[in-house]
Image (tube, rainbow, N blue to C red):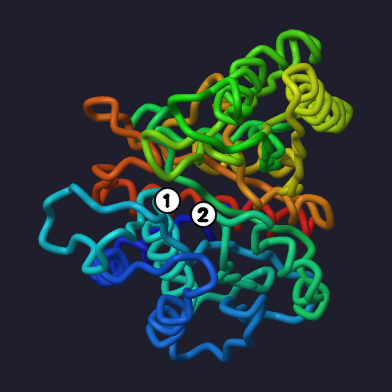
Amino acid sequence: MNSELLEALVAGIDTVLPDATSLRRAIHADPHLGGDEGDTRDAFTEATGWLDWTPVAETGAYTRTGPDGPAVGLRAELDALPLTEATGVEWASQRRGIMHACGHDVHLAALWAVLTAARDLDLPAAMVPVLQPREEENPPGAGDVVASGALEDADVAAMVGVHVQPQVERGVVSTGSGAVNAAFDSFEITVRGRGGHGAYPHTALDPITVLSAIVTGLGELPMRVINPIHPSVVSVGTFHAGTAANVIAETAACTGSIRTFHEKDRAALHEAIARLAEGTAMARGATATATFVRGGPALVNDADLAQRADALLAGLNVPVAPVPFRSCGSDDFSEYGQVVPSLMSFIGVGSDGGVGLHHPEFLPGRSALRLAAIALAANYAAAADLLTA
């Protein structure tokens, strides 16, 4: 096991932690949405001026450092979310309506700390840091990174990452083998009725009432279509219709997400949603169409990598979750696991007052950054150990 390597990386991480904190705060204060992350990418690449970066997936970048031979990819995400921050800290977002509310600023700073700590070390396997765009979008950016051929060009033979998680106890790392996150797809349903005056509903065909019935039915689908021991979720996120209180709209539309752990369940829910929308609308004299955008597959942690990483963390006396955290959350990191063994660890940051991911008050502390960097270093060391065994 690469315990000595990990100890050296941790010592380096602790040395550069103040600078990593400053970088994290700078990134947090200047967030950018998916597709517009060039400034975030440039801030990171400028802070790692000793590395020669190559553009990837439009607004992303990757590079390679270390010896020849199979390498370990280390992913960090660039994009923020369309939220108005409510943390009140001095380094809060300066861009109203945009916020790093999913911890990507922490992940980037953790990656910087690991790269900086490794700068003068004799690495057993090369590191290939990947600054990935559009993790929050669908279709997401990881698929574009894979399709670009960057992993093959850099000889990436394993991929690792970390993600802060308020549902894991503060100070604990949860990895675990097998599926830890769900596949993600999005859908849009549009209902077309017949517009008219609100005073004369009998002369119109209200698409809002039709779509409301469809939305109610969507919540019941997983329990009626999917094996109850298989995790699955259908959620509606937006509902749009109408222009005035006294006008019956011509159309109504909603968007939502589908999360599953099994490919057969994924296909079954697509079919069931389309059937529900079309049938419900037809029964009321309207029409409905359902369209789908496939996101990433389920995120599956390699069992060997997970075991090695947990052992390395235990050697540092870092608490490891006895029961791995699994959820119907999704992450396009799963795309990398389709081509190489991969490992994602969840960094426990706790949930103060119920504040979780994608919340305007979500703000992991400095201890989360250190733990994320250590876990990322452990995952790298585990993968390097596997590749050089």
368 displayed left or right of 213: left
When asked about the image quadrant of residue 284, the answer is: top right
Q: Residue at x 61, y 41 (%)?
A: 251
Q: Residue at x 29, y 32 (%)?
A: 355
Count how many numbered circles sit on residues in the image. 2
Give the class, few, some or many, for how many residues have Cα within 10 Å of label 2's Cα (few <14, many ≥20): many
Q: Amino acid at mark 1?
A: Ala
Nearer to us in this view, 171 or 188: 188
Q: What is the quadrant of the C terminus in the image?
A: bottom right
Give the class, few, some or many, for how many residues have Cα within 10 Å of label 1's Cα (few <14, many ≥20): many
Query: In the rendered view, would you say 283 is above or below 260?
Result: above
State how far apart marks 1 and 2 are (Cα): 6 Å
Nearer to us in this view, 51 or 105: 105
| Residue at the spot of label 2 | 376
Query: In the rendered view, would you say 339 is above or below 246?
Result: below
100 displayed left or right of 188: left
Q: Residue at x 37, y 61 (%)?
A: 105
